[in-house]
Image: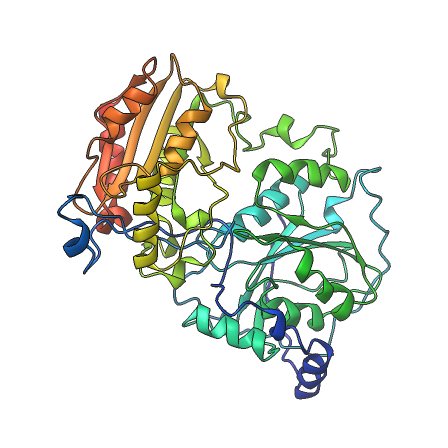
Amino acid sequence: MKSMKKIFVLVSAAALAAASLTACGRASGSSDNAEAAETTEAVEISETTEGAETERAAENSDSAESAETTEAVEMSETTEGAETAEGTEPIGGSDDTAESTEAAENQGGTETTDASNTLVVYFSHTGNTEEVAQEIADYTGATLAEIQRAVPYDDVNTEGEEELENDARPEITVDLDGIEQYDTIFVGYPIWWDEAPMVIDTFLESYDFSGKTLVPFCTSASDSIDNSLHIFSELAPGATVAEGLTANDEEEIVPWLNSLGYGADSSGNTAEETGSTENGTSGSNILIAYFTAAENSGVDAVASASYSEVNGEAKGRMQALAEMIQERTGGDLFSIRTDVVYPADGGELIDYAADEQAEDARPGLTSHIENLDSYDTIFIGYPNWWGDMPQALYSFFDEYDFSGKTIIPFNSHNGSRFSNTIQTIQELEPDANVIEDGFTINERDVPDAAGDIDAWLGELGY
C-alpha cells in the first residue's frame, strides 16, 4: 500500500454556488422518514431499556439488548471526535482541481488492470463501507484513501438529511497526493436517503476526472446504488463511469472485481490463491459467526445510543467481541446478514424483536458460509433479545447442518446472560458438540472484554 499524504483544497464560494445549481432537486426525492443508512453496523437491542420492563418484564425477565446501529452494509465508520489532520486544509467544491491525465478505458475484465494506477477512495461513517473498500484495495493492490468530513457530524441523522435537502457541499479532507497518477478510481459510500452523502458531491467537484474511469460502489441496508449514480455523470462529465456495485453481499465483490479486470496479481495468481480473507481461504478451521442488528439496520452506529467504542472506534458489540476472538484464534469472521432492515430506534427495535418472536419468524439470510466443510469449530455470537436468540439465528441454524462440529456460543446481555439459548442450540443442532461454557458479558463491559476473552479462550485451549 502506498503511503498517503493529506492535501486539501478549499472550496470557493463560486464553486459552491455552481454546485448548488447543478444538483438542485436531489433533496426533493429523498425519503422523509429514512434514517442515515450504511449497510452493516450497529443496532443491538438493549435487554433492559428504561420504561420497557414495566410492560414486558412480567412475561420476559430478559429484556432486549441495547441497539447498535449500522451503515446498512457499513460497520463502525465514525471515529468519535475525528479531527482534521494538523496542518491540512479542508476541501470544498473548488475549481482548483488536480491536473488530469489520459486514462485507458476499463475493458470490462478482458485484461488485467494495473493496480499501480488504481485508487480506492471512500467515505464511511460506521465502518461498513470502509470494510468493503479495504477488501477491494487488498484484492486489487490499489492505493486506499479515506474521505472525511472536515467537521465531524454531531447528529448525523439531522445534519446528513439537511445537507441533502439543501444540496450542500460540506468541506472534506482526503488522504491524497493528488489523482493525476491514477487512471481508475473506485468511489465508495453508504446510501443515505436513497442518495450518496453530500461529501461525495464535494469530492467529485474537487478534482478533474477527465479521461479517468470512475467505479462506484456503495453499502446499503436495502437500497441499491442505482439512484445515486446520476452524480457521476453530472459532476464528473469527462470521466467514464464503470458498472457499480451495491456491496450488500460479500460474495459478489470478488466476481465484480474480476469482471473489471482485477482477477490476477502480477504472478497470475488470483486473490484467493494469495491469501484472501474470504470464508474458507485463510487456512483456518475456525469460523466466528455473529449476528448484530448493527449490520442489518438502515442507519449508522453514531445515530444510536447503543454501540460500544472499542479502541477509539464505534462498532456493534457482537462485531467487537467477534474481532477479539479472531485476534486470539485466527479464525475467519462471518457476519450473519438478513433481508430485514431492523429499526434504528431502540424502543421500536425492542417491539420489533418481540413481534418476531411471537410470530416465530425466519428472516431471510443474505450472507452464506462458503466451504462449511473446511471448519471444525464454529463460534456463534448473538445478543440476548427477550431471553432468547434473535430470530435470525433460527434462520441460521435452519440453513446449516453442524453435525460433528464444535459450536462455542458467545453473547452480550444486560442482565440475562445466556438465558436458555445454549439449550436451544443443542436442540437445533443435536449432532453437534455444543460447548456449555460459552462467553457471556454485560453490554456495558464489551469495550474492555479483551482480557476476559483471552482468559476464557485460554481455558478452552486456545
- Is residue 406 toward the left or the right of residue 371 in the image? left
Observer-nearest of 126 and 400: 400
Whole-percent x and y of residue 161? 51, 72
- Is residue 309 toward the left or the right of residue 166 in the image? left
Whole-percent x and y of residue 309? 33, 55
Vertical arrangement, residue 169 with respect to residue 418, above or below: below
Question: Which residue is the extreme one toward the front?
Answer: 359
Vertical arrangement, residue 309 with respect to residue 236, above or below: above
Is residue 301 at least partly visible in the picture?
yes
Whole-percent x and y of residue 13? 66, 87
Q: Quadrant of residue 312?
A: bottom left
Vertical arrangement, residue 285 with respect to residue 314, above or below: above
Residue positioned 29% across, 20% down in the render: 427
- Is residue 300 toward the left or the right of residue 87 in the image? left
Vertical arrangement, residue 115 with respect to residue 232, above or below: above
Is residue 310 at least partly visible in the picture?
no
- Is residue 449 toward the left or the right of residue 125 in the image? left
Observer-nearest of 237 and 167: 167
Whole-percent x and y of residue 293? 39, 47
